[in-house]
């Protein structure tokens, strides 16, 4: 190796074998030349030996493990997903898809009635696919269009059932996770919050079956196919059954616009218990028919026909056709739909107070709710 010529260097004062001390600029040159020469020599040495330039390069792989807290979205999804199922139906007119979840380890599945109603009416087939890909034929144990709920049974045991939460204790702003099969994409997880509670939502085909839901509103992305899947809280407990979405009224089927609705699980659990035990479910009524054309505030009892059913709690309490109900058990009523869902959120036998307007005068009555006849 040739070192640069160094000017004005004093004689070395140390032993004869010690190299003279170069100037600062020379040090830089020495380092630079040494590195370049080393690189060139390494290159020539590798190629002279006929080897690859990168043969001596060792790539290092990381073996670190990502820790996910049990209460994180990933942790909750990992626990809940094995209990969520995809539901597909086949009829003479085509097919459909939806979601559901295991509510009992012996094979009971809770879903929406509208997911399976066409197959039931037309004698079609219902298939339930578990998260691991195993497929079973679904048998309908019971369904109720009024609450848009249905219970299926598959021939399986030892399934992991989801834990029920308390939908009455959920608060606006609480974090939630929706899981299901939107657009047939099974095992899809989306997150959001509870945007509102006690939303009066009407779903179903108005020509045949309609459902009135006292719904939880969420901004978690819910799309067609999510119906029947669970809405879970930050502990992984089910607090709702995803059932409906709001659309902008376009002619084509719209996707999520951040307005999804779920049936509160407290109501869902009550109906599911009845369907499993009896095959049918019932709901409480006051015994009145409402005027759907009324545009004022409140819910007006129909003036024509049987606005007040004979022998009903409403008749016994003195309600008449034309009365406008503005409050039900402490809750303000703004529309007929709000009154219907408020009544159905109660239990048969509950004692409630109604406030109504008659000829401009506010009145109130107290009555006991009775079961609707099936």
Image: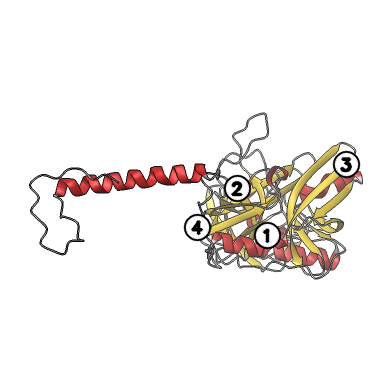
| Residue 329 position in % (x across, y down) | 58, 62
Instruction: Assess whether mark 2 and mark 4 are in contact (beta carbons under 8 angstroms).
Output: no
Q: Nearer the viewer, mark 2 or mark 3?
A: 3
**What residue is pinned by disc 2?**
260
Quadrant of res 80: bottom right
Above or below for 122 versus 242: above
Q: Earlier in the sequence, mark 4 or mark 2?
A: 4
Instruction: Assess whether mark 3 and mark 2 are in contact (beta carbons under 8 angstroms).
Output: no
**What residue is pinned by disc 1?**
81
| Residue 314 position in % (x across, y down) | 69, 58
State the mark number for residue 172: 4
Q: CA distance from mark 3 to mark 1?
A: 28 Å
**Residue at point 51%, 42% (across, down):** 47
Q: Nearer the viewer, mark 2 or mark 1?
A: 1
| Residue 75 position in % (x across, y down) | 58, 64
Q: CA distance from mark 4 to mark 1?
A: 25 Å
Q: Nearer the viewer, residue 166 or 324?
A: 166
Q: CA distance from mark 2 to mark 1?
A: 20 Å
Quadrant of res 283: bottom right
Q: CA distance from mark 4 to mark 2?
A: 14 Å
Label 4: how many residues lie within 10 Å, few (<14), some (14-19) or many (20+)?
Answer: some
83 lies left or right of 153: left
- Which element type, helix, strand or loop, lies under badge 3? strand
- Which element type, helix, strand or loop, lies under badge 4? loop
Instruction: Assess whether mark 4 and mark 3 are in contact (beta carbons under 8 angstroms).
Output: no
Q: Earlier in the sequence, mark 2 or mark 3?
A: 3
Q: Nearer the viewer, mark 4 or mark 1?
A: 1
| Residue 350 position in % (x across, y down) | 67, 68
- Residue 300 in view (yes/no): no
**What residue is pinned by disc 3?**
91
- Which element type, helix, strand or loop, lies under badge 1? helix
Q: CA distance from mark 3 to mark 4?
A: 40 Å
């Amino acid at each position: 190796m040739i070192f640069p010529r160094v000017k004005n260097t004093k004689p070395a004062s140390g032993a004869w074998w010690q190299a003279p001390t170069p100037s600062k600029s020379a040090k830089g040159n020495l380092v630079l030349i040494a590195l370049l020469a080393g690189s060139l020599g390494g290159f020539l040495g590798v190629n002279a030996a006929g080897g690859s330039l990168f043969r001596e390069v060792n790539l290092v792989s990381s073996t670190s493990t990502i820790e996910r807290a049990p209460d994180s979205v990933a942790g909750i999804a990992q626990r809940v997903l094995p209990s969520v199922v995809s539901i597909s139906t086949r009829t003479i007119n085509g097919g459909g898809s939806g979601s559901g979840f295991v509510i009992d380890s012996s094979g009971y599945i809770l879903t929406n009635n509208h997911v399976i109603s066409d197959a039931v009416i037309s004698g079609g087939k219902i298939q339930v696919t578990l998260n691991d890909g195993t497929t079973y034929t679904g048998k309908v144990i019971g369904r109720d269009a009024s609450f848009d709920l249905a219970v299926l049974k598959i021939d399986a045991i030892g399934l992991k059932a989801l834990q029920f939460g308390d939908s009455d204790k959920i608060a606006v702003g609480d974090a939630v996770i929706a899981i299901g099969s939107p657009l047939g994409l099974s095992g899809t997880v989306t997150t959001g919050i509870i945007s509102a509670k006690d939303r009066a939502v009407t779903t179903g085909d108005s020509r045949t079956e309609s459902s009135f839901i006292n719904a939880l509103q969420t901004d978690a992305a819910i799309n067609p196919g999510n119906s029947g899947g669970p809405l879970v809280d930050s502990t992984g407990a089910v607090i709702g059954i995803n059932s409906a979405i709001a659309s902008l009224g376009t002619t084509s089927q719209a996707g999520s616009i951040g307005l999804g609705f779920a049936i509160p699980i407290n109501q869902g659990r009550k109906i599911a218990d009845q369907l499993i035990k009896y095959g049918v479910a019932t709901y409480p009524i006051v015994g009145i028919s409402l005027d759907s054309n009324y545009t004022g505030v409140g819910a007006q009892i129909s003036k024509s026909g049987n606005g007040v059913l004979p022998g009903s709690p409403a008749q016994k309490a003195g309600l008449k056709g034309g009365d406008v109900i503005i409050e039900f058990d402490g809750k303000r009523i703004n529309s007929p739909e709000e009154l219907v869902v408020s009544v159905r959120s109660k239990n048969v036998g509950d004692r409630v107070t109604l406030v109504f307007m008659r000829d401009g005068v506010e009145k109130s009555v107290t009555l006991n709710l009775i079961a609707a006849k099936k």
